[in-house]
Image (cartoon, helix red, strand yellow):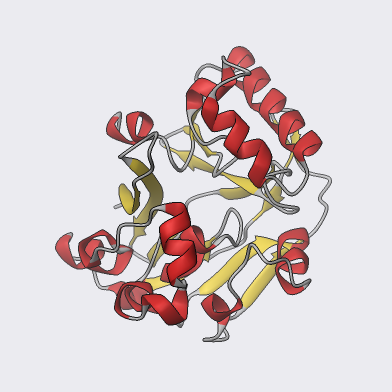
């Protein structure tokens, strides 16, 4: 039996939006659990100054809540967090990686470009989020194509097909995650956009923030165009991002 759970593992409050989410996915199979992005974790909640820093917490608007952690939500679902075997990560920004330490035996899957960016000293990242030294599998350029886009297959011992889809720009190695589910595809696009309305409104305030936060804004805009084309050409694919509360509520 397979199930997919949609978890909100982050809450951010800003002057412009008091309900920014962190939309993670949990794939449940007999073989174990796969987590797609992790949100903030227990260590971030219990040791916020050491793990995140007060300046970042205030600047972003993180609301620290044990009940939002993926670990806690798994317990609520009656699942054993120790069964998490894989964490597939869109990119290594702290609101996506904080929960990794809660699953120390899970293999981390991320693009090669993203790990290189993380290790380059880019100040957007928090090195302490990998201080538990997880096993990391990186994925470089692939010749596999998924609906006209490069795809990097994530091999696991699970039934579910999982692909990393390069959507660079927000960070140097940012990827979406495509999941084959019940004969259809889901594409989680991470932070390729913050709010879906950005796809229709070039002057959306969230788009201005995304531009300011992008490592490579030209690539970010190209990734947005790829998403727009995919939505137009393949409406059967369910597409959603990380931070849009309306999208999360739709599940």
In front of the other: 24 or 17: 17
Q: Is residue 133 above or below residue 98?
A: below
Q: Is residue 30 above or below residue 104?
A: above
Give the x, y percent position of residue 76: 15, 62
44 and 163: which is toward the camera: 44
Q: Residue at x 55, y 64 (%)?
A: 156
Residue 177 in the image, given as x and y percentages of width and height: 57, 46
Image quadrant for the C terminus?
A: top left
Q: Residue furthest bottom?
A: 132
Does residue 2 appear anywhere in the picture? no
Q: Quadrant of residue 167?
A: top right
Residue 14 picture quarter: top left
Q: Residue at x 32, y 74 (%)?
A: 42
Image position of 131 (left or right of 212): left
- Say above or below: 95 vs 54: above
Q: Position of residue 10 (x, y in %)?
A: 35, 54
Q: Residue at x 46, y 71 (%)?
A: 52
Work out whether 83 lies above or below 250. Answer: below
Q: Position of residue 59 (x, y in %)?
A: 47, 55
Q: How many marks?
A: 0
- Determine whether, in the image, residue 161 is placed left or right of residue 75: right
Q: Residue at x 63, y 20 (%)?
A: 228
The answer to whether one can see residue 121 in this image is yes
């Amino acid at each position: 039996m397979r199930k997919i759970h949609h978890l909100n593992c982050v809450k951010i409050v800003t002057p412009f939006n008091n309900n920014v989410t962190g939309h993670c996915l949990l794939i449940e199979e007999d073989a174990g659990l796969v987590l797609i992005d992790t949100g903030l974790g227990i260590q971030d909640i219990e040791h916020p100054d050491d793990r995140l820093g007060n300046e970042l917490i205030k600047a972003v608007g993180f609301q620290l809540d044990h009940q939002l952690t993926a670990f806690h939500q798994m317990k609520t679902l009656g699942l054993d967090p120790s069964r998490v075997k894989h964490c597939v990560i869109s990119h290594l920004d702290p609101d996506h990686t904080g929960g990794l330490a809660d699953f120390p035996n899970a293999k981390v899957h991320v693009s090669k470009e993203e790990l290189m960016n993380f290790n380059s000293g880019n100040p957007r990242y928090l090195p302490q989020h990998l201080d538990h030294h997880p096993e990391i599998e990186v994925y470089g350029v692939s010749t596999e194509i998924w609906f006209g886009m490069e795809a990097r297959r994530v091999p696991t011992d699970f039934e579910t097909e999982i692909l990393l889809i390069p959507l660079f720009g927000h960070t140097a190695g940012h990827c979406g995650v495509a999941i084959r589910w019940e004969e259809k595809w889901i594409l989680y696009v991470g932070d390729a956009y913050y709010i879906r309305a950005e796809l229709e409104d070039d002057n959306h305030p969230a788009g201005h923030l995304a531009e300011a936060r992008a490592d490579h804004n030209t690539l970010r805009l190209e990734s947005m165009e790829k998403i727009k084309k995919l939505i137009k050409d393949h409406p059967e694919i369910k597409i959603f991002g990380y931070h849009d509360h309306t999208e999360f509520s739709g599940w």
